[in-house]
Amino acid sequence: MTQPAISLPTFDFAAFTTALNARRREVGRDWYQLADDLWNQSSDLNAALDEGHTMCGGALSRLPSRDDTSCQYAMFALRWMNRAPEDFLTGPVVDVGDTRLPQADSDSRLRWDLAELYAAVDEQRREHGLTWTALAGALGCTPARLTNLRTARQADLALVVRLAQWVHRPAASFIHPTRW
């Protein structure tokens, strides 16, 4: 038997990229300068990790033509705009309280803790008596997209925000300053 779809909001990626582009223009930056600004939010961490520059202005400029991005990549922009993922939800939004992102200094990056999200989803899934297959069907994704969160470092932004809503927690509760 197929589970009925779960009524949850969706992440409006067009609104996210429109806000990013508007803020970029407001501060007078081109896409390549924005890439530098996003990357340099973690300048001390970048120096400590001896990483080359991994933000690409061309890739950023193509975001508005896409429908999604990884949750980790989006964190650079959300941090820079000082906006929470919930700011870009449409549909029946679950009130999860304070959605402000945690603070991060130049020696860290904001990252989703996908294992922590997986654990919260698994707990709710069990409480509702759902199999991974049933939950995935109700959410409109594959079971592997859910179970892979246990060990993943990357996932689709739209999916993880939707899952945070499903467990009735702010996305920020799964986002932490890290050193990777």
Image (tube, rainbow, N blue to C red):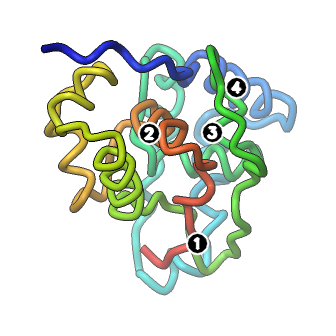
Quarter of the image where one finds residue 43: bottom right
Residue hosting label 3: 85
Residue 53 in picture, x, y percent from top left: 45, 60
Q: Of the residues shown, which amino acid type is indicated by label 3? A: Pro
Which residue is farthest bottom?
48
Q: Identify the residue position indicated by label 4 in the image.
A: 21
The Cα–Cα distance between marks 3 and 4, rounded to whole angstroms, is 16 Å
Q: Are marks 4 and 2 in contact (CB under 8 Å)?
A: no
Query: Counting residues from the N terminus, which is met first, the one under dot 3 or under dot 4?
Result: 4
Depth order, front residue of 179/58: 179
Compute the Cα span from label 1 to label 3.
16 Å
Q: Does label 1 or label 3 sit earlier along the sequence?
A: 3
The C terminus lies in which quarter of the figure?
bottom left
Q: Quadrant of residue 71?
A: top left
The residues bearing labels 4 and 2 have C-alpha atoms spaced at a distance of 26 Å
Q: Is residue 166 above or below residue 38?
A: above
Name the mark nearer the viewer: 4 or 2. 2
> The residue under label 2 is which amino acid type?
Leu
**Does the residue at mark 2 contact the one at mark 3 (Cβ under 8 Å)?**
no
Q: Amino acid at mark 4?
A: Asn
Point out the frontmost of discs 2 and 1.
Answer: 2
Question: Which is more N-terminal, label 3 or label 2?
Answer: 3
* In the displayed structure image, the side of residue 83 where residue 66 appears, left or right: left
Q: Residues within 10 Å of mark 4 (few under 14, many from 20)?
A: some
Q: Which residue is mark 1?
A: 177
Task: Label 4, secondary structure: give it.
Answer: helix
Between residue 164 and residue 77, name the one nearer to us. 164
Quadrant the N terminus occupies:
top left
Q: Describe the element under mark 2 as helix, strand or loop.
A: helix
